Image (cartoon, grey):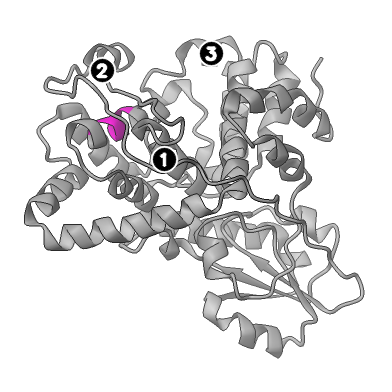
Amino acid sequence: MFTPTYTAALSRLSAFVPHAGSDYARLRNYDDMAHVSGLSPYIRHRIITEPDVLRAVLARHSPQAAEKCVQEVVWRTYWKGWLELRPGIWADYQRDLASAINQVQTQSGLRQRWEAACLGQTGIDCFDHWATELATTGYLHNHARMWFASIWMHTLELPWTLGADFFLRHLLDGDPASNTLSWRWVAGMQTQGKTYLARPDNIAKYTNGRFRPAGLAQVAHPLACPPHPARGPLPVSGTIAPDLRTGLVVTEEDLSPGWLLDQVRPVATAFVRTTQARSPLQVAPQVAGFVTDAMADCHARFGAKLGTVTFIAADDLPQWREAHGLGQVVTSYLPVGPAADTLRHASLVQPIRQYDQTAWPHAHSGFFRFKDAIPKLLGQIKGLTTA
């Protein structure tokens, strides 16, 4: 379904743009790939970027006509910024996931229910269909993700962290911020006390009658959780020293390094894949394959500017750095998540894209307050017309 190349991303974007206005606003909630962009795996790895999508959409539609599309694009930006300001939420998720996995290993009943859910063998037809679809394709429609998460927690009564992990292991667009915080939202932990309940009538409507499940929970009780941690400082953009012998590290967090190559000409580039760090369990082969092939495409696109190119493991970076006599190693900023965890000791200069620097300070509260900053965010995007 998703060819991991820049060309394929542009093709999808071109096909979607004519429908990004009223069509998208009217039809986006239906569980049908024909009504959504399918761009999320590309945006997640920044094969194309949020500004690329916004620029293309608003070249065709007015901001008013494309309001819903614009909001969906910047939801990812908002989640990223919110987690940057509260990185402890990611650490808490990892800790609670480890505890849940331990419970799976020691409680046979829980293990059986968890395995049935992951394998699509619960007897709830829509849920089982979505579990199979996700494992097969690496993708689920956003509305199906909400229904799935609600059924996982409120009907099957499985730990939310195991469900979030199931998604992160299988989704081609699996993103630490969007995934973790969306599951917390369904659980009533993100907007504390407000849950999301999957309802048979809603499922029937937006699957065009394919499913009307029986036996779903009638009420969704919020999961217990502590208050949100205090908002921390914003990350500071790294500064590239122009006179140092420089290496570049490319990770799956940003596979469009052209903006960095405008600032520096590396003598060597290391591609470092951290996909397996997304979960303590085995990450789906199609996720690892998507990232591997997307990195190869990035190499093909930018190879002439990358110097000597190597594909290496994170543990080999010190030797790579020494072998090339590097005075500094630059990478696009690593947001909170597995890549940042894996490379935290690598001594990297991490510039932050201007788009993120503009948006993240506004992600301090709920999304509806963040929306007020959208005009400013759009105004910052070079080449964007909003007439």
Q: How much space separates mark 3 and mark 1, taking CA atoms?
A: 23 Å
Q: Nearer the viewer, residue 66 or 202?
A: 202
Compared across the picture, whether 387 is left or right of 44 comes to right
The amino acid on which the numbered mark 2 sits, given as a three-letter code, is Arg
* Residue furthest right in the image: 243
Q: Quadrant of the N terminus?
A: top left
Q: Tag 3's secondary structure?
A: helix
Residue 75 visible in the shown view: yes
Q: Earlier in the sequence, mark 3 or mark 2?
A: 3
Q: Tag 1's secondary structure?
A: loop
Look at 90% across and 70% down and name the residue there.
242
Look at 12% across and 37% down and name the residue there.
122
Q: Which residue is mark 3?
A: 25
Q: Earlier in the sequence, mark 1 or mark 2?
A: 1
Residue 290 vertical placement versus 62 (above, below): below
Look at 71% across and 16% down and name the residue there.
63
Q: Which residue is mark 1?
A: 1
